[in-house]
Image (tube, rainbow, N blue to C red):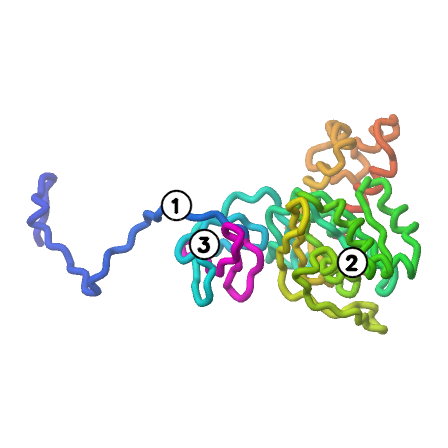
């Protein structure tokens, strides 16, 4: 066996030829500094429609991104054919840093996290006051996901002609959540869209709600030029509607540069991915009171310092009750 010393002449070393004739693989990846910027509008079976310079461009994710997936609302960098013409396909080579992230799991025992929307400023939680009945536990879970993901919540109540909003407003009054109450008549004549639009201008807003509450109907009223299929059918036995939206879609508002993201109706909103310690930051008036809490305090135990903080008059007791209700929502079923 031939041995080589420290000063071996490289010309003496035999190199195995590349039988395939292609270049060897490398870990060095191109930076794509000249890539165009775009926003993901919708995702359908591995194909992503992106907005690039005011035109839709169909794209696919580059292999170099690995398992990292782009979702609606993502800011991405694209290369390739950016003309947007039929039968052309661009390539997403980079996903930019996200400012917010709405996530959920199928249930509280599911370790698989599903990213719903990225970079949204606001989460509009749509609930009907009747037909189907409101589900406060689902609303609570959406609120927790919004606070955890960095989105501001907006409560949109529909079908006020069938039931008054008083009970729901009393339940969420201490949270100081902006809200809109609409009726079917207002939805038909356009007044409801005008009321909601006041909260959307200049923002990216994701709409979420369980089936049958009129979410997609409201989105159609807000963006009439891009109507989505709707149905008013609600099952008389279960009190739940049928899904009409099967994929998230970002639609531009005609005024003030805002965006509306319609998401599929949800029947569950798991919070397995949520760190409860982050929910307290949605209650800035209570945060100073946590300084005396024991380490890893759940803020719902006998030694929690928030009880004394509130008793001393530093914050409204209703706010502490609301915080603890949201923190406990993972332990309760949405239908309870």
Q: How many marks?
A: 3
Q: For residue 83: magenta? A: no
Q: Secondary structure at mark 2?
A: loop
Q: Residue at x 85, y 51 (%)?
A: 181
Q: Residue at x 92, y 58 (%)?
A: 163
Q: Which residue is mark 1?
A: 34
For the residues marked 3 and 2, what is the alpha-carbon distance in whole angstroms? Answer: 39 Å
Nearer the observer, 295 or 110: 110
- Can I make out residue 294 in this image? yes
Magenta stretch?
Answer: 40-64
Asked if one can make out residue 275 in the rendered structure from this viewpoint, the answer is: no
Element assignment for label 1: loop
Report crowding for label 1: few under 14, some 14 to 19, many 20 or more residues within 10 A (C-alpha): few
The residue where tag 2 is placed is 333
Task: Mark 1 vs mark 2: give the one in front.
Answer: 1
In primary-sequence order, the first of circles 1 and 2 is 1
Q: Nearer the viewer, mark 3 or mark 2?
A: 3
**Could you classify mark 2 by the number of other residues whose Cα lies within 10 Å: few (under 14), some (14-19), or many (20 or more)?**
some
In the rendered image, which quarter contains the C terminus?
A: bottom right
Q: Which residue is mark 3?
A: 92
The tag earlier along the polypeptide, 3 or 2, is 3
Q: Nearer the viewer, residue 113 or 142?
A: 142
In the rendered image, residue 69, in percent from the top left (x then y), is placed at 51, 55
């Amino acid at each position: 066996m031939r041995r080589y010393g420290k000063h071996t002449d490289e010309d003496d070393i035999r190199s195995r030829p590349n039988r395939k004739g292609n270049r060897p693989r490398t870990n060095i990846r191109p930076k794509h500094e000249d890539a165009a910027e775009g926003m993901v509008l919708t995702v359908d079976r591995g194909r992503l429609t992106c907005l690039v310079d005011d035109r839709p461009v169909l794209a696919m994710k580059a292999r170099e991104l690995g398992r990292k997936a782009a979702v609606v609302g993502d800011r991405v960098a694209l290369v390739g054919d950016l003309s947007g013409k039929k039968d052309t396909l661009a390539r997403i080579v980079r996903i930019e840093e996200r400012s917010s992230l709405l996530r959920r799991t199928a249930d509280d025992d599911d370790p698989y996290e599903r990213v719903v929307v990225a970079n949204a400023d606001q989460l509009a939680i749509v609930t009907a006051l009747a037909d189907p009945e409101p589900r406060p536990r689902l609303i609570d879970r959406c609120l927790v996901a919004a606070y955890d993901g960095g989105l501001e919540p907006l409560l949109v109540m529909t079908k006020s002609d069938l039931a008054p909003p008083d009970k729901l407003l009393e339940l969420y009054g201490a949270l100081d959540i902006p809200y809109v109450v609409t009726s079917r008549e207002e939805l038909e004549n356009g007044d409801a869209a005008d009321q909601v639009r006041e909260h959307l201008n200049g923002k990216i807003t994701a709409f979420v709600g369980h089936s049958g509450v009129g979410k997609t109907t409201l989105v159609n009223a807000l963006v009439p030029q891009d109507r989505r299929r709707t149905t008013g059918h609600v099952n008389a036995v279960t009190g739940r509607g049928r899904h009409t939206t099967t994929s998230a879609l970002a639609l531009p508002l005609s005024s003030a540069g805002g965006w509306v993201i319609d998401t599929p109706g949800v029947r569950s909103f798991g919070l397995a991915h949520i760190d409860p310690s982050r929910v307290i930051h949605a209650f800035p008036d209570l945060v100073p009171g946590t300084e005396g809490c024991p380490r890893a305090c759940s803020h719902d135990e006998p030694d929690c310092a928030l009880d004394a903080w509130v008793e001393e008059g530093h914050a409204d007791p209703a706010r502490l009750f609301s915080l603890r209700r949201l923190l406990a929502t993972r332990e309760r079923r949405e239908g309870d």
